[in-house]
Amino acid sequence: MPTCPPLSVLSDDALDWQVLLHSGNATAADRARYQRWCRLSPAHAEAATEAEALWRDLGHTPTAQATPLTPRRWRRLSALAASLVLCMAGYGAWQQLPAWRADYHTSVGQRQSLTLADGSRVTLNSASALSVVYSDHERKVVLEAGEALFETVADPRPFVVQASGAAVTGNAAVFSVRRVSGGDQVLLAEGQAQVDGQALQPAADARTRTAWQRGKLIFNGKPLGQVLAELERYQHGRIVIPDSQLAALEVSGVFDLDDPHALLRTLEQRYGLKVTYLPFLAVVY
């Protein structure tokens, strides 16, 4: 008869299951596999019950606040928080790799403006990195990470921004480029710019979408999940909202980037939300 894994291993596996089941990506097959996993042994069932209780203790249900923490569950919750700290520290170090090799970079929550040799101005957003590769024939910059707003001056040499995908060219123009998973987001505010030769049109809401350079975040009827994802860029750690219905709540307002934690407090007060804080993790419900 095979030996059952230690409870500590099963507890970690059970927490992994909770992350999957509450990620919004779990399928019916995943839930069925989880039920089969729970029935493998009494130890599996115990680990599952404990993990489900810990998940509630993170604030995923309003009734969790009324559930007392036993010493054992408190130790497990503390251990989970410590594990999250280590994971985020490792992730943060990995995130900073592009910055270590870039000419200019910002840390999380920091913004920086700089003037290049030709007089063009660049504003780097939070956790961004930029390298400059000027030559006699081309004014090229490489956006290694994050987002930057470019205010380019007229010059016989083309101004080219290379990010994760296509090259963006703009002369005497104001535009932003942001690296995102699966490609780049390019926003033209003034002048003329092209992406791989395709002309861009100035965005009507460019001033609102580039308000970060002025230290503001502006939202008008945006889903709460999208707002929290944007806020997460300006502070260390993760912001989790497991309720898909709540994530769809429309949010409007102007928020100060110099105090990103105040944004969560404002959302709590204005929309009746609750937030449970752990090291490098905030759970909104």
Image (spheres, rainbow, N blue to C red):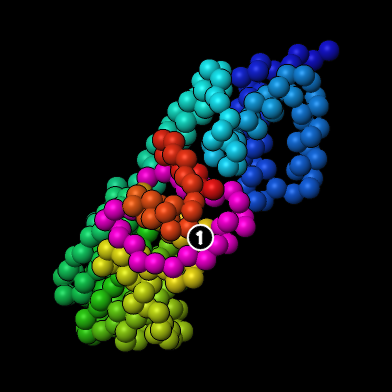
- The answer to which quarter of the image holds residue 191 is bottom left
Residue 267 lies left or right of residue 259; in this view the side is right
Which residue shows up at 58% across the image and 36% down it?
64
The secondary element bearing badge 1 is classed as helix
- Is 119 or 213 nearer to us in this picture? 213
Q: Residue 137: x percent and y percent? A: 26, 77
Which residue shows up at 30% across the image and 58% down it?
257
Which residue shows up at 32% across the image and 84% down it?
190
Residue 264 lies left or right of residue 190; in this view the side is right
Give the magenta part as a residue range.
236-260
Q: Residue 91: x percent and y percent? A: 43, 41
Residue 266 lies left or right of residue 221; in this view the side is left
Residue corresponding to mark 1: 224
**Residue 130 seen by the camera:** no
Q: Residue 112: x percent and y percent? A: 22, 60
- Is 117 or 88 nearer to us in this picture? 88
Which residue shows up at 44% across the image and 52% down it?
268
Residue that lies at the very extreme toward the right in this rendered image: 1
Task: Check the image and report above or below for 83 versus 233.
Answer: above
Amino acid at dot 1: Leu
- Is 285 or 166 nearer to us in this picture? 285
Q: Residue 63: x percent and y percent? A: 60, 38
Assess whether residue 56 is covered by the magenta stretch: no
